[in-house]
Amino acid sequence: MAERVPPPGLVPRPAAASSSVIRDALALARRPGVLSFAGGMPASELLDVEGLRAAYDHVLSTEPVAALQYSLTDGDPRLRELIAGRLTGRGLDTDPAGLVVTTGAQQALMLLATVLLRPGDTVAVEEPTYLAALQCFAYTGARVVSVPADDGGIDVDALAHVVARDRPRLVYLVPDFQNPTGRTLALERRRAVARLAETRGFWIAEDDPYGELRFRGEHLPWVAAQTGARDRTVLLGSLSKILAPGLRLGWMSAPPALLRAVVLAKQAMDLHTSSVDQAAAAHYLANHDIDARLVGGRALYRERCDAMLGELSSVLPPGSTWSRPDGGMFLWVRLPEGFDSAALLPKAVDHGVSYVPGAPFFAGPPDASTLRLSFAGHGREETVEGMRRLGKALS
Ligand code: PMP
């Protein structure tokens, strides 16, 4: 009998390593009795179960065949029109033809990486940044260069230096209430990044799943809306944080040539995003005052954020610092020198609390003393108790 030959092995991908840190952290967080501040889940109280059930009922009873058949790659025309209307209302004049509905903003990120990046191309990111964006870039074989950032977002002088030195094809930014730090890109820096893109020629990915969750301060216009940026900025958005993440509905608004390439890539990837989910979401958005619901959502997140901020100074080790977000779902803690948040996580879980260690969010050398807390999931009482447990674990 001929010898059995194994099939070829898998392609090694750098994206796999850091994702396992998060997977382990989330698995630990699921232990019974653990108060988890780890995941990026919107508050369950904000999910409109009845409204969405009615929307699905409606589309399945009035247009069952359309809702269940294959549909267009670029998305349900009604949903595109509603999203374009929202973007226009928020200050960026958008034609429905200028956007594609995607399976979450996450797919939009992977599509963008697919059409823009070749192995060895450079992407510049703020430090730290959204882990799953780093994973998308890693899959393409691109080289990720990190740029220092502070409370006002990416350091534009440092970015200018990186641009001159490394000639990135893409600069990836989360300008509002960034994941993981909760920080917001200052207005003058939005203008400066746009000017830099205009004069040096690179693409900007403006990833904005949290922009409608501002609970303090003034709304800031998108980078895409700054002079000179429109024809080189790709704006990504999502229904995940304003309606429900399980719908997996996001979008990309981009210049026509890039969008055409994205539609072809999406065709190869999944043909189109779920017809029934798009139809239900379009029906929901057309028939509910989502802005009125968002007023309540923002108030809830402000209350929860403030409850957490109110505890940190009395529970964290002296010398710790943390961000003070104006919106979104996350805040970022830096423990004193010598603390290692990943090594401390099992101890925290033993005390009945969890978080996400900060290291995987760094494209460059990680700061092991950092960690991300989500304030979205728990009310005041649980937050106070969770922070008390965190303090004990770290003491
Ligand atoms: N970008 C950022 C910055 C995020 O935090 C997330 C979700 N955690 C996404 C994109 C992906 O969102 P979606 O659920 O729309 O795929």
Image (tube, rainbow, N blue to C red):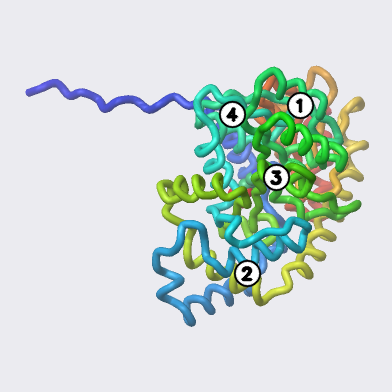
For the residue labelled by badge 3, is the local secondary structure a helix, a strand or a loop? strand
Residue in front for this viewpoint, 230 or 346: 230
Q: Is residue 341 left or right of residue 271?
A: right
Are the residues at dot 3 and dot 1 in contact (C-beta closer than 8 Å)? Answer: no
For the residue labelled by badge 2, is the local secondary structure a helix, a strand or a loop? helix
Q: Separation of disc 3 and disc 2 at Cα?
A: 23 Å
Position of the N terminus, as image quadrant, is top left
Q: Residue furthest left?
A: 1
**Residue 34 appears anywhere in the view:** no
The residue carrying mark 3 is 36
Amino acid carrying label 3: it is: Ser
Where on the picture, by quarter, is residue 193?
A: top right
Are the residues at dot 3 and dot 4 in contact (C-beta closer than 8 Å)? Answer: no
The residue carrying mark 4 is 18
Tell me if mark 2 has few (under 14), some (14-19) or many (20+) residues whose alpha carbon lies within 10 angstroms of its own. few
Are the residues at dot 4 and dot 1 in contact (C-beta closer than 8 Å)? Answer: no
Q: Is mark 4 within 8 Å of ligand 1?
A: no
Of callouts 3 and 4, which one flags the residue occurring earlier in the amino acid sequence?
A: 4
Taking the spot 78% from the left edge, 22% from the top edge, the residue there is 339
Amino acid carrying label 1: it is: Leu
Where on the picture, by quarter, is residue 87?
A: bottom right
The residue carrying mark 2 is 49
Residue 336: percent from left, percent from top: 85, 23
Residue 174: percent from left, percent from top: 72, 41
The residue carrying mark 1 is 159
For the residue labelled by badge 1, is the local secondary structure a helix, a strand or a loop? helix
Amino acid carrying label 2: it is: Val
Q: Nearer the viewer, mark 4 or mark 1?
A: 1
Of callouts 2 and 1, which one flags the residue occurring earlier in the amino acid sequence?
A: 2
